[in-house]
Image (cartoon, rainbow, N blue to C red):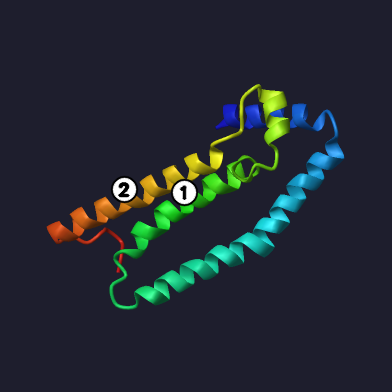
Amino acid sequence: MLCSFALCAYAGVRLLDGDWFMVALWFVGAAVVHDLVLLPLYAAADRALVKGARRRRTWVVYARVPAALSGLLLLVWFPLITGRVSERYAGVAGLSADGYAVRWLIVTAVLFGGSAVVFAVRMRRGRRAPGVS
């Protein structure tokens, strides 16, 4: 854990070495956007999912996990998925930014498909997922 903190401190010093004000503004903005915009959105989506399931809530976990992973991938790769930074990315990385949206959709489909298969197998065996009411 100490090594991890040391690495984070080193990365922070290197990151703040340039334009520290914009980096700090970005971090504060990201925290505010998450807490005031994203958290209420995905909490409302989860609440709607649970209310829609009413009696049989065993499948809710099998929708939450792939949705969370897909949302995390979308959040991390949003500029490339939307194509907003294609030219700049190609200039810096030397790679094309084409295909990120298609790849994200494929990964999302595989996540939901895999989750559906696991759900079907567990339902067929008659087992309930641990910790699910």
Residue on which the image places disc 1: 69
Farthest left residue in view: 125
Name the N-terminal-most of marks 1 and 2: 1
* Front disc: 1 or 2: 2
- Is label 2 in a helix, a strand or a loop? helix
Quarter of the rendering occupied by the C terminus: bottom left
Q: Position of residue 130 (x, y in %)?
A: 27, 58
| Marks 1 and 2 close (CB-CB < 8 Å) | no
At horizontal 54% and vertical 43% (from top left) the residue drawn is 101
Cα distance in 3D space between marks 1 and 2: 13 Å
Residue nearest the viewer, comparing 1 with 45: 45
**Mark linked to residue 114:** 2
Residue nearest the viewer, comparing 41 with 110: 110
Q: How many marks?
A: 2
Q: Amino acid at mark 1?
A: Leu
Q: Is residue 114 above or below residue 35?
A: above
At horizontal 32% and vertical 50% (from top left) the residue drawn is 113
- Is label 1 in a helix, a strand or a loop? helix
At horizontal 76% and vertical 31% (from top left) the residue drawn is 15
Q: Position of residue 41 (x, y in %)?
A: 58, 65
At horizontal 66% and vertical 63% (from top left) the residue drawn is 37
Residue 65, image quadrant: bottom left
Q: Position of residue 59 (x, y in %)?
A: 31, 64
Q: Residues within 10 Å of mark 1 (few under 14, many from 20)?
A: some
